[in-house]
């Protein structure tokens, strides 16, 4: 039923829709489900090019048995405000699936999603192990990846042995700045290639055009980040 667990028939329809080249929104409309539900289902079961209805159904049953044996997931530490725990879990999984779809490793995406749904924006490794049902080593690797990307930081409270992993409002701004820095490198290389190949040749013109696009993207990103920072500063002054 709409809103309940996906059935084997639902999964067959998803597989058929993917085979027909349909997008998540159209498949979801036919099933009476949100597009995010379809995307999460496909992402966690091989992606659009390798999704199989029977395999996905069996994998889901296996995960359900594993989670049942592991015990219930930890409650969100700051889960007040009248939030429905099931809705919180759903948005955590949806957010994680979106990040995986964008190319982020699965456990790293889960870590970031778990941090985002907490009001504190901070969790320990033990919290994350319990929530994601993965090994401490997997959490450690995911945290290292996210730290290298500037998407979280480690924080140790004096007198407390366990460190916490923390995100803040500037997480995406730092990520965008890192993207701009990489784009600057690509622009420099593209312009050098255009100079070597000749900017009037098809190959050289291709590099020159790519550099022009990346410059426009970087300028838009810089303006966006600056505007966002001004709005935060104005909101803080007004508060």
Image (cartoon, rainbow, N blue to C red):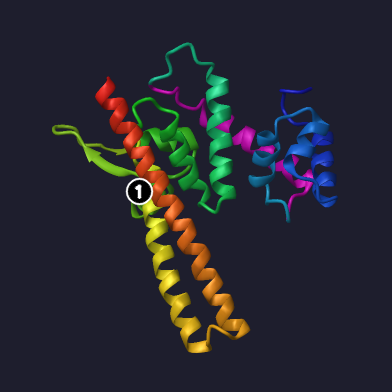
Q: Residue at (28%, 32%) from the top-left corner?
A: 233
Residue 49 vertical placement versus 83 (above, below): below
Q: Is residue 90 visible in this depiction of the protein?
A: yes
Estimate the x, y position of residue 56 in percent, counting from the top left: 73, 43
Q: Residue at (37%, 48%) from the top-left corner?
A: 143
Can you name the residue that lies furthest to the left here? 159
Q: Residue 52 colored magenta?
A: yes
Where residue 158 sits, quadrant-wise, is top left
Q: Residue at (85%, 46%) from the top-left corner?
A: 16
Estimate the x, y position of residue 42 in percent, counting from the top left: 69, 44
Q: Nearer the viewer, residue 97 or 7?
A: 97
Residue identifier under label 1: 174
Where residue 61 sits, quadrant-wise, is top right
Residue 15 vertical placement versus 130 (above, below): below
Estimate the x, y position of residue 130 in percent, counting from the top left: 44, 33
Q: Magenta span covers which residues?
A: 50-77
| Magenta region, main secondary structure | helix
Q: Nearer the viewer, residue 33 or 202?
A: 202
């Amino acid at each position: 039923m709409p809103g309940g667990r996906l059935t084997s028939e639902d999964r067959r329809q998803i597989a058929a829709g993917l085979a027909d080249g349909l997008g998540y929104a159209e498949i979801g409309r036919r099933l009476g489900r949100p597009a995010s539900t379809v995307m999460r289902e496909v992402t966690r079961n091989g992606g659009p090019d390798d999704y199989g209805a029977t395999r996905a159904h069996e994998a889901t049953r296996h995960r359900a048995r594993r989670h049942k044996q592991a015990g219930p997931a930890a409650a969100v530490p700051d889960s007040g405000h009248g939030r429905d725990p099931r809705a919180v879990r759903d948005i955590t999984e949806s957010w994680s699936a979106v990040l995986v779809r964008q190319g982020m490793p699965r456990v790293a995406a889960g870590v970031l999603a778990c941090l985002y749904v907490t009001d504190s924006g901070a969790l320990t490794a033990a919290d994350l192990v319990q929530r994601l049902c993965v090994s401490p080593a997997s959490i450690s690797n995911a945290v290292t990846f996210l730290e290298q990307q500037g998407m979280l930081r480690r924080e140790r409270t004096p007198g407390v042995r366990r460190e916490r992993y923390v995100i803040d409002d500037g997480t995406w701004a730092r990520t965008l700045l890192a993207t701009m820095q990489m784009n600057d490198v690509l622009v420099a290389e593209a312009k050098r290639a255009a100079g070597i190949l000749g900017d009037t040749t098809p190959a050289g013109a291709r590099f020159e055009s790519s550099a022009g696009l990346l410059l426009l993207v970087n300028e838009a990103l810089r303006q966006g980040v600056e505007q966002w920072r001004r709005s935060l500063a104005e909101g803080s002054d007004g508060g």
